[in-house]
């Protein structure tokens, strides 16, 4: 990645179409479209889940049936028809390979196209990958290294079988089934996802990473991630996404639950680059995600996200600061171009004493897109000496896009100290002029300025991700000059 | 019978009494239909998320005060800014009190809404301006339906009014509970200048609910300074809906001083319909007990090269609740807009609550928009410094809080009014010092 230069970028910018837009034909075992109790049962059965899990899913389904799709977000879209989605699809050649040689070569080619060849990743970055292609884990690496430390990192369906006591204890504790419409739907039909448990006092030696991909036409993907950091442990978790180019809208409703027990720290980074729809706003992924972390005493959860894809993004990674002295952080860059719409932000719920939270949100809108920040900072009456700092900056490119800020601040304690600031601006003509004058063309100048604008957040990403994210920003904003 | 039904049936009676003026009556009839459809806002409405009217709506309000009450000037003198000469429009329980008022028709109109709505010579102004700024939200519509009395101010072109205008609404509350719906219309023509002070004062312990609508029009290069004093009794609640339409190069400012009342809700809306307009929205809120003050502001930037400044300070003690919901909308055409919004709060009790939501909705790219919002405490070291200099704790705290709100006070352009507000603040903070010494 380090050899990547500006000229390479220029080359890349020339390819206007979504570069990761391809579709691999793997024979999928796909369920008929529609959703009812039988489908929920069948998913559960398919995954050989124990009885309590099936019941849990059914309960979620019953709750979901009575719920209405929320409409408060500042986005407009054609509502998905939930009966026109197939809720399960799995690659046909059943997983569990011991080595890469056994993996379907076509699948391997897919990975190559995405530039994440497994062997390369293994050697280069020391990243353990739990690759998810269409809902079922097909390869898990570095498992043994992790196992030595007692770290459990596997797909959630395996975890349900192998560590039911952990899953049963924690699933749904941070995001309950009735939390919201999409969380309920996810709870009922989640197909797979990742599970991670870091035992007491262990510092996870490598960055854990999962690549999510949507691969089968008309399959909504419902990922469920559960990360538990036991007392005094540390883990850094990466999540990155690319999706093939599709004409019909694809629904994605994931749920991520993080649990940081006393003195633990979780760092969760996301780079999201799903198909945003073409320049006319056709197609693109609907991304309705519920992400929430729970901090016990002295624990820390840090969310970092770079959002460049999806036609609709609806996502609020949150922290419940339950324990005293716990810390929540949220760093975000959301880029929207063409007809993309993003309504994203965070919630910081301060319950414990001396809790601290930081919110840095950068929104960049170009083309005809709409970009909203929506955040909540809530200080409860028992949260003595709570501290919050929020900063939301928006950058507008062109006069057909919009930037919106909806911060909610609710304070019930007199010792709270809260600061919130937001600014909206555009790239200064004088800045561009200065760059032009020094021989930097406009497109590059903008890339430069955008980079500087987002630096505070990019710096929070792990090294390899930061480079990728920077590249993504530039690609997403291509052609928006003017 | 709940309040909504009561109001709807009262309207039938009201309509029968009304004069057949086609324009106003049509507006009223449309408005009652809107209200019937929408009903009172509930916490489910985003704009009313933090303010519930439920408690207020349970009272059995009398919609039309039955008898007229008189007040002696010496009894209510303290509610006037009596140190200066001014025009006065005074209402007692929603009825005009000629005895306490000082109106004029000499070159400008400072008079009554009831006269303006009925007399033919005002017809043109009414048809051009009445209900042209107010939105059709349920409470404004309710007021429109029952609009009958209030202040009417018309300033013709090129007039600078030397004397401020005081609009005071007293409620004596002989009834067990009273609902008042005053309606004000203020039209300021080109190059004119006016200062207005508005006050709602309840003289009784019985519940009073005031649902007021004020419409203001500032024409080219007009200047309006509007001051609202909200220092009412513990059982009086106020829903104030103010709408200001500005034409190019006009300057309008509204200062809201909220120190009392059970529940106060300020819906303050500015619409900028021309270039190079300046709008100022400022407020100081100092409340305690179980009081609730909600500022809900909107500045709609429609044309380029305009400015808006918002600055709201709040100090909340005891079980008080403060809400700030500020919204700035910048339309696509409104390039070069400069919008600033600040909301600073101090909580001085464990049970006080502040909910704030400063919003920006921006569709233009060449703008400078920022908002800031803080919740914090008094600076310990500053307090310590003053106490080492022999200033008692209470006074030291009061001084800091006064300094905190001084930004807003400093732009009050009537010195007597400023002095009066300073006095109220001292009183509110429980100290006996003149801050302007």
Image (cartoon, rainbow, N blue to C red):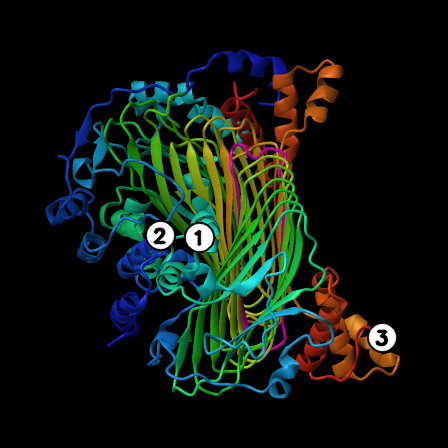
The answer to whether residue A164 shows anywhere in this view is yes
Distance, label 1 to label 3, CA atoms, is 50 Å
Left/right of residue B289 with respect to residue B87 in the rendered view: left
The answer to whether residue A227 shows anywhere in this view is no
Of the pair A338 and A124, the residue shown nearer to us: A338
Q: Quickly name the residue at label 3.
A: B437
Q: Which mark identifies residue B23?
A: 2
Q: Relative to B42, does residue A331 appear above or below in the rendering? A: above
Distance, label 2 to label 1, CA atoms, is 9 Å
Q: Residue A219: x and y, percent?
A: 24, 32
Chain at tag 1: B
Give the quadrant of residue B346: bottom right
Distance, label 2 to label 3, CA atoms, is 54 Å
Kindly state the secondary structure of the residue where label 2 is placed: helix
Magenta stretch bounds: B327-356
Q: Which mark identifies residue B74?
A: none
Kindly state the secondary structure of the residue where label 1 is placed: helix
Q: Relative to B330, does residue B195 appear above or below in the rendering? A: below
Q: Residue A410: x and y, percent?
A: 51, 63
Mark 1 Cα shell of 10 Å, populated few (<14), some (14-19), many (≥20): some
Q: Relative to B159, does residue A100 appear above or below in the rendering? A: above
Q: Are the residues under marks 1 and 3 on the same chain? A: yes
Residue B340 lies in the magenta stretch: yes
Q: Which mark identifies residue B123?
A: 1
Q: How many marks?
A: 3
């Amino acid at each position: 990645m380090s050899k990547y230069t500006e000229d390479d970028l220029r080359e890349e910018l020339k390819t206007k179409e979504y570069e990761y837009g391809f579709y691999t034909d793997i024979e999928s075992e796909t369920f008929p479209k529609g959703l009812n109790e039988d489908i929920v049962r069948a998913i559960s059965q398919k995954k050989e889940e124990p009885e309590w899990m099936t019941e849990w899913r059914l309960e979620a389904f019953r709750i979901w049936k009575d719920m209405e799709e929320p409409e408060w977000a500042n986005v407009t879209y054609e509502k998905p028809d939930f009966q026109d989605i197939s809720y399960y699809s799995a690659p046909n050649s059943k997983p569990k390979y011991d080595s890469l040689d056994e993996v379907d070569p076509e699948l391997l080619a897919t990975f190559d196209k995405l530039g994440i060849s497994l062997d390369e990743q293994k050697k280069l970055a020391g990243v353990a990958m739990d690759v998810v292609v269409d809902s079922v884990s097909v390869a898990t690496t570095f498992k043994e290294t992790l196992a030595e430390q007692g770290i459990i990192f596997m797909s959630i369906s395996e975890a349900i079988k192998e560590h039911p006591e952990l899953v049963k204890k924690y699933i749904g504790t941070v995001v309950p089934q009735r939390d919201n419409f999409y969380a309920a739907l996810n709870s009922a039909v989640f197909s797979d996802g990742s599970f991670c448990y870091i035992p007491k006092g262990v510092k996870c030696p490598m960055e854990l990473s999962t690549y999510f991909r949507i691969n089968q036409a008309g399959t909504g993907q419902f990922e469920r991630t559960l990360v538990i950091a036991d007392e005094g442990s540390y883990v850094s978790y990466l999540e990155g996404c690319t999706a093939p180019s599709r004409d019909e809208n694809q629904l994605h409703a994931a749920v991520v639950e993080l649990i940081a027990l006393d003195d633990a720290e979780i760092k969760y980074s996301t780079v999201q680059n799903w198909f945003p729809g073409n320049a006319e706003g056709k197609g693109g992924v609907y991304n309705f995600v519920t992400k929430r972390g729970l901090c016990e005493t002295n624990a820390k959860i840090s969310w970092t996200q770079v959002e460049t894809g999806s036609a609709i993004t609806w996502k609020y990674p949150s922290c419940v600061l339950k324990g005293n002295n716990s810390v929540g952080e949220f760093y975000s860059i959301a880029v929207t171009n063409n007809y993309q719409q993003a309504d994203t932000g965070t919630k910081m719920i301060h319950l414990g004493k001396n809790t601290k939270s930081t919110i840095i949100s950068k929104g960049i809108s170009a083309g005809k897109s709409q970009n909203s920040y929506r955040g909540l900072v809530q200080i409860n009456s028992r949260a003595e000496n709570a501290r919050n700092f929020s900063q939301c900056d928006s950058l507008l490119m062109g006069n057909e896009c919009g930037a919106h800020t909806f911060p909610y601040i609710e304070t019930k304690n007199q010792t709270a100290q809260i600061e919130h600031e937001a600014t909206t601006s555009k790239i200064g003509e004088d800045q561009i002029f200065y760059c032009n004058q020094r021989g930097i063309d406009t497109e590059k100048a903008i890339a430069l300025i955008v980079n500087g604008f987002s630096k505070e957040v990019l710096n929070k990403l792990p090294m390899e991700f930061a480079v990728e994210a920077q590249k993504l920003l530039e690609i997403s904003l291509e052609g928006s000059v003017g | 019978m709940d309040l909504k039904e009561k109001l709807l049936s009262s309207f039938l009676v009201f309509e029968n009494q009304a004069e057949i003026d086609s324009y106003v009556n049509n507006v009223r009839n449309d408005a009652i239909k809107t209200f019937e459809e929408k009903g009172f806002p509930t916490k489910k409405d985003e704009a009313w998320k933090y303010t519930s009217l439920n408690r207020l709506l349970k009272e059995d309000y009398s919609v039309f005060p039955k008898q007229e009450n008189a007040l002696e000037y010496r009894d209510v003198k303290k509610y006037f800014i009596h140190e200066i000469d001014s025009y006065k429009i005074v209402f007692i329980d929603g009825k005009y009190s000629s005895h306490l008022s000082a109106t004029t028709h000499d070159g400008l109109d400072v008079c009554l809404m009831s006269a303006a709505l009925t007399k033919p010579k005002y017809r043109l102004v009414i048809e051009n301006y009445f209900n042209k700024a107010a939105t059709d939200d349920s409470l404004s519509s309710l007021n429109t339906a029952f609009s009958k009395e209030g202040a009417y101010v018309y300033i013709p072109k090129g007039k600078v009014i030397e004397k401020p205008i005081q609009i005071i609404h007293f409620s004596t509350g002989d009834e067990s509970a009273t609902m008042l719906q005053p309606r004000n219309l203020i039209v300021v023509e080109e190059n004119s200048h006016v200062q207005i002070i508005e006050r709602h004062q309840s003289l009784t312990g019985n519940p009073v609910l005031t649902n007021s609508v004020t419409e203001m029009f500032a024409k080219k290069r007009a200047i309006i300074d509007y001051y609202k004093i909200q220092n009412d009794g513990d059982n009086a609640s106020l829903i104030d809906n103010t709408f200001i339409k500005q034409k190019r190069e006009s300057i309008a400012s509204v200062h809201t001083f909220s120190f009392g009342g059970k529940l106060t809700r300020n819906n303050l809306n500015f619409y900028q319909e021309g270039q190079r307009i300046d709008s100022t929205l400022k407020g100081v809120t100092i409340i305690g007990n179980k009081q609730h003050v909600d500022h809900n502001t909107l500045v709609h930037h429609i044309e380029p090269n305009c400015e808006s400044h918002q600055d709201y300070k709040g100090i909340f003690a005891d079980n008080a609740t403060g809400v700030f919901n500020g919204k700035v909308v910048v339309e696509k055409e409104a390039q070069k807009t400069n919008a600033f919004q600040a909301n600073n709060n101090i909580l001085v009790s464990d049970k006080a609550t502040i909910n704030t939501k400063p919003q920006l909705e921006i569709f233009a790219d060449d703008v400078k928009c920022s908002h800031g919002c803080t919740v914090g405490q008094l600076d310990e070291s500053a307090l310590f410094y003053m106490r080492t200099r022999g200033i008692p704790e209470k006074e030291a705290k009061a001084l800091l809080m006064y300094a905190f709100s001084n930004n807003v006070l400093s732009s009050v352009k009537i010195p007597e009014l400023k002095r009066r507000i300073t006095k109220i603040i001292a009183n509110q903070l429980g100290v006996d010092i003149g801050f302007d010494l």
